[in-house]
């Protein structure tokens, strides 16, 4: 039996067996068989990737890819093994005399009948062979040129070396009954066939470079395309079919209906060889034919990629039932001539053009690790390393239930593929995709126009290779769909190989349907956004009541938008932080994979939400800052002048002593200091967050890999950052340590060390000074600092005595009302009180010059002093219930009023003082807006990190921002304090 017949019969038997299987068993799963798996009675059929049995009279050839008779294989193996160990010493190939040359074996010199070749050996005319020795090996006196008999009696021609006559190829004899392939027959690749009127006569030996817009004649295709197509079509030669398939792949698998290029010939032969049968029950894979295409059916790509899950499950961590943490890709390699090379694992960087350590290269196939590798290669290096293309059929290996190693073909999405001049594989419409199977890395061969040894005019490089692994929706066991390889080639016109460079990349990405998470996020934003609008309407209504207005005007709309911006910023912040922490905990903590991170392209909406939160919160923060810098404040001095004895010539008389202003200066300085007091230490916050991110290694949790380890080996591959995980880690740490600082400050530091807010209230009582604050037109705060001792402008002895009496409960309580300790109030005043306050306040501010060097005339100073005393007198009288038409009453806020931070009762005739033991007057200080500042700082830190991908830079810029706004708040607040209280800035230190 001939070798080809053995292979065909074996494949046919396999095909018939496959037809007997039930329809439900049809699958892309293939049992893995390699040449070393074949028994001594089998040979390896690379076209089918199976071991095929040979008849009893034959054995596998030396290469294991054919069957040969016993005697032949023995002789071949023996001679090959033996001669490979013999040392050969060749004489110098010099002409020893005129007309004499060196024998072909190089051991002797002999007289030549028809001249010499350039190498110094004897030369014969075409159709003749050179004979130099007798049958017993004795050298002839003169070499002889013997003509081979091409007649019907023998049909012989010289062999390739011209040393013996051999029988002509059977195709030539069959066609012409001679050793010459006459017209209209065509000789290609040693095969004679009649191509007249046949597609084989219209072969197009060109390569289309669509990126450059040029079509070149290819010397490689000119020599081999027609021969490979004829041998594949007429004689089913699997090597020729593989070579033809390779030439189609070199042409980007591009398809044109009327074309007879490599892909046109391939598809023509495929459609006309349906009787050959299929391989492994896969209809796109014909016997002795390479599998290049899936099909052209609309929507087939969707079914190929999502119809059948991959049979094996994967996990992130080793466990008793979770063993698969690596993707085991394998590839069947073919050379450009169609010869099967070997099976190889993709580990070790088989498809990665960028050099790196084996450990980092192999990290690409760790399940769940997003891999990205980029580099730049010179054209000269590419030409040196890839003289000929190698072709890869990629499979994903797995163990079946019977422990049999199987493989699953991995489809390829070639972005350069053209179907009827259209790039169908661009875009996200999967129904238009045309999937293929075979790829190559570099093609420096098909672009050679004149000779195969010349420099190629154009080379083609796989500049971008991406492995995409999709998780099956709803899985909890790490079930995936078959992977997809996306390849994009770059055409480079060779001009200066030493200076030309090409950028290449290799990546592995993991994805899953994010429709559910997007829907959940949108629902959360919609619901919380609606609640935020309702809350903003309530806050706007409260603001309208506090400014004493009932008209909805432009100012009301603007205020509503500002309030809504602040509340909506909180909504975006809650959703984004929740999303980041959710992905961080769920993705990094899972063993059996149920979720995968969104791709970088899918994170755009998330980044938009974070940006919206930052912009809205910045607007809210600036509004709060401006509101604090425009409050009305006045220090009410309760101290009354004391009578003092003045000695004169007329005797002694009593006169009122002036009240000292230093107590007011002292209280003003204390107020100025607490304006920027915070519960969080910004410098400590920056250092502790950076410590945990950089030193403790929490930033490693933001990598797109399956590891939850905080420490990483510097030699390991470092996966790209996930924006969502990075935001989740950064925001969680910043918020976490911020909240811990607030708890420590409120629960321990203020209780056992220092509470500046309560100390300020106590200081007001000791100084006999109250603080009247209006943050809105008709709303504000009052700190009752009237001394229970009557006066505070006294000496140290009396002051200590007063403190002792108060400690021993020998005096009344400090509160505004009898038998009450409440000293702080929220106040709501009617319009007439505000009108009187503004009238006096306008005189006060009008008489105050913009600079200490202006309006220093005695009249201006007297008017300012008069306005100050008028305001002090008015507010003192107001607090003492001296005005019947401007009286007030004290009450507690309702629970709902406290929860909503608003007032239900509108002051009509009398003002309302609400008891406030929580010191709400801190709302006009940084202290009362710690949550706003913390959220703003968190968003600022995260936004800078998103833009820079650098935690250290983000921390430094955030600290500078904090200090900048603290400085602005301190300076502007000091100026406002000096302006509203008539205290010179020179005393505010």
Image (cartoon, rainbow, N blue to C red):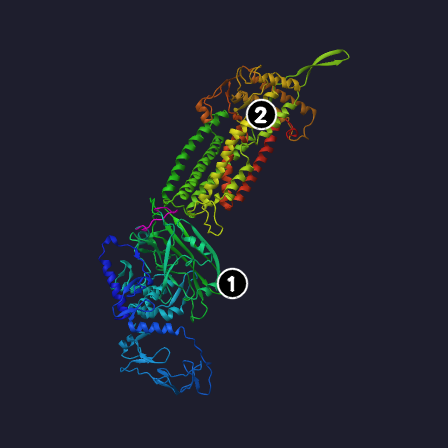
Q: Which residue is mark 1?
A: 499
Image quadrant where residue 858 sits:
top right
- Of residue 70 and residue 588, the one placed in the foreground of this image is 70
Which labelled disc corresponds to residue 760?
Answer: 2
Q: Residue furthest top?
A: 651
Q: Residue furthest right?
A: 649
Q: From where the camera sits, is residue 188 visible?
A: no
Q: Position of residue 522 (x, y in %)?
A: 39, 39
Magenta residue span: 308-321
Mark 2 surroundings within 10 Å by alpha-carbon count, few (fewer than 14), some (14 through 19), many (20 or more): some
Residue at x-position 44% and y-position 52%: 372
Q: Secondary structure at mark 2?
A: helix
Q: Is residue 317 above or below residue 828?
A: below
Q: Position of residue 756 (x, y in %)?
A: 57, 27
Q: Is residue 977 above or below residue 378?
A: above
Residue at x-position 44% and y-position 86%: 100
Residue 318 falls within the magenta-colored stretch? yes
Of tags 2 and 1, which is closer to the observer? Answer: 2
Image quadrant where residue 183 sits:
bottom left
Q: Badges 2 and 1: C-beta atoms under 8 Å apart?
A: no
Q: Is residue 274 above or below residue 540?
A: below
Residue 642 falls within the magenta-colored stretch? no
Q: Secondary structure at mark 1?
A: loop
Q: From where the camera sits, is residue 172 visible?
A: yes
Q: Position of residue 461 (x, y in %)?
A: 43, 61
Image quadrant where residue 585 sits:
top left
Residue at x-position 27% and y-position 82%: 152
The total number of labels drawn is: 2
903 relative to 769 in the view: left or right:
left
């Amino acid at each position: 039996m001939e070798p080809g017949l053995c292979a065909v019969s074996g494949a046919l038997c396999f095909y018939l067996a496959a037809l007997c299987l039930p329809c439900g068993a049809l699958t892309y799963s293939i049992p893995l068989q390699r040449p070393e798996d074949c028994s001594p009675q089998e040979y390896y059929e690379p076209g089918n990737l199976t071991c095929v049995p040979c008849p009893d009279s034959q054995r596998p050839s030396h290469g294991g890819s054919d069957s040969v008779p016993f005697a032949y294989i023995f002789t071949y193996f023996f001679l090959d093994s033996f001669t490979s160990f013999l040392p050969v010493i060749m004489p110098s190939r010099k002409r020893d005399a005129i007309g004499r040359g060196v024998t072909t074996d190089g051991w002797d010199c002999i007289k030549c009948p028809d001249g010499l070749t350039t190498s110094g050996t004897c030369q014969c005319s075409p159709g003749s062979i050179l004979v130099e020795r007798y049958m017993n090996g004795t050298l002839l006196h003169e070499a002889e040129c013997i003509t081979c008999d091409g007649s019907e009696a023998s049909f012989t021609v010289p062999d390739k070396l011209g040393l013996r006559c051999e029988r002509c190829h059977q195709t030539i004899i069959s066609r012409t009954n001679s050793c010459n392939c006459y017209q209209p027959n065509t000789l290609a690749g040693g095969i004679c066939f009649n191509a007249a009127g046949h597609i084989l006569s219209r072969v197009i030996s060109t390569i289309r470079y669509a990126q450059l817009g040029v079509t070149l004649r290819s010397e490689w295709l000119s020599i081999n395309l027609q021969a490979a197509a004829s041998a594949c079509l007429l004689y089913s030669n699997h090597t020729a079919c593989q070579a033809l398939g390779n030439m189609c792949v070199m042409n980007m698998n591009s398809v044109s209906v009327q074309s007879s290029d490599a892909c046109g010939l391939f598809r023509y032969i495929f459609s006309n060889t349906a009787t050959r049968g299929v391989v492994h029950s896969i209809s796109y894979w014909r016997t002795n034919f390479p599998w290049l295409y899936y099909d052209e059916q609309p929507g087939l790509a969707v079914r190929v990629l999502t119809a059948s899950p991959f049979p094996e499950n994967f996990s992130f961590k080793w466990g008793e039932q979770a063993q698969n943490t690596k993707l085991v890709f394998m590839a069947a390699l073919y050379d450009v001539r169609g010869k099967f090379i070997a099976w190889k694992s993709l580990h070790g960087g088989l498809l990665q053009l960028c050099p790196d350590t084996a450990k980092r290269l192999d990290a690409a196939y760790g399940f769940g690790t997003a891999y990205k590798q980029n580099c730049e290669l010179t054209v000269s290096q590419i030409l040196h390393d890839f003289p000929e293309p190698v072709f890869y059929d990629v499979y994903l290996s797995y163990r079946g239930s019977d422990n049999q190693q199987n493989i699953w073909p991995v489809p390829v999405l070639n972005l350069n593929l053209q179907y009827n001049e259209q790039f169908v594989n661009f875009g996200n419409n999967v129904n238009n995709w045309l999937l293929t199977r075979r790829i190559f890395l570099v093609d420096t061969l098909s672009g050679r126009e004149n000779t195969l040894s010349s420099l190629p005019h154009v080379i083609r490089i796989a500049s971008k290779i991406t492995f995409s692994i999709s998780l099956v929706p709803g899985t909890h066991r790490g079930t995936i769909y078959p992977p997809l390889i996306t390849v994009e080639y770059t055409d480079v016109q060779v001009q200066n190989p030493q200076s030309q460079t090409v950028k290449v990349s290799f990546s592995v990405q993991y994805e899953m349907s994010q429709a559910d998470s997007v829907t959940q996020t949108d629902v959360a934003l919609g619901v919380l956004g609606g609640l935020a609008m309702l809350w903003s309407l309530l806050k706007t209504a409260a603001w309208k009541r506090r400014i004493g207005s009932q008209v909805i005007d432009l100012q009301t709309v603007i205020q509503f938008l500002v309030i809504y911006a602040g509340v909506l910023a909180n909504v975006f912040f809650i959703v984004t932080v929740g999303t980041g922490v959710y992905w961080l905990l769920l993705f990094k903590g899972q063993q059996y994979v149920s979720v995968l991170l969104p791709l970088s392209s899918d994170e755009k909406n998330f980044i938009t939400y974070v940006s919206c939160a930052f912009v809205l919160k910045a607007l809210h923060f600036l509004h709060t800052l401006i509101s604090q810098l425009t409050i009305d404040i006045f220090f009410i001095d309760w101290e009354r002048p004391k009578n003092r004895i003045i000695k004169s010539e007329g005797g002694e008389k009593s006169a009122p002593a002036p009240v000292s202003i230093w107590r007011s200066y002292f209280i003003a300085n204390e107020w100025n200091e607490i304006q920027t007091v915070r519960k969080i230490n910004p410098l400590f916050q920056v250092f502790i967050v950076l410590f945990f991110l950089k030193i403790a290694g929490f930033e490693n949790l933001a990598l797109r890999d399956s590891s939850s380890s905080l420490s990483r080996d510097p030699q390991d591959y470092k996966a790209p950052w996930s924006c969502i995980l990075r935001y989740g880690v950064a925001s969680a740490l910043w918020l976490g340590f911020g909240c811990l600082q607030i708890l420590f400050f409120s629960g321990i530091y203020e209780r056992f060390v220092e509470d500046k807010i309560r100390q300020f209230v106590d200081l007001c009582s000791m100084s006999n000074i109250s603080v009247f604050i209006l943050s809105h037109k008709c709303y504000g705060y009052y700190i009752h600092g009237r001394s229970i001792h009557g006066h505070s402008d006294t000496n140290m002895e009396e002051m200590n005595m007063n403190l002792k009496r108060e400690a021993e409960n020998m005096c009344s309580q400090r509160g505004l009302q009898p038998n009450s300790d409440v000293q702080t109030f929220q106040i709501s005043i009617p319009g007439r009180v505000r009108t009187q306050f503004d009238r006096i306040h306008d005189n006060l501010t009008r008489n105050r010059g913009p600079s200490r060097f202006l309006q220093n005339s005695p009249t201006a100073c007297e008017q300012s002093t008069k306005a100050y005393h008028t305001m002090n007198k008015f507010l003192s009288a107001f607090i003492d219930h001296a005005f019947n038409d401007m009286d007030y009453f004290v009450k507690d806020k309702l629970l709902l009023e406290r929860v909503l931070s608003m007032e239900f009762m509108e002051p009509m005739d009398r003002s309302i003082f609400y008891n406030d033991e929580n010191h709400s007057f801190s709302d006009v200080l940084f202290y009362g807006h710690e949550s706003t500042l913390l959220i703003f700082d968190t968003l600022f830190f995260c936004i800078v990190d998103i833009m820079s991908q650098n935690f250290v830079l983000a921390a430094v810029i955030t600290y500078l921002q904090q200090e900048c706004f603290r400085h602005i708040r301190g300076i502007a607040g000091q100026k406002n304090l000096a302006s509203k209280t008539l205290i010179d800035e020179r005393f505010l230190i």
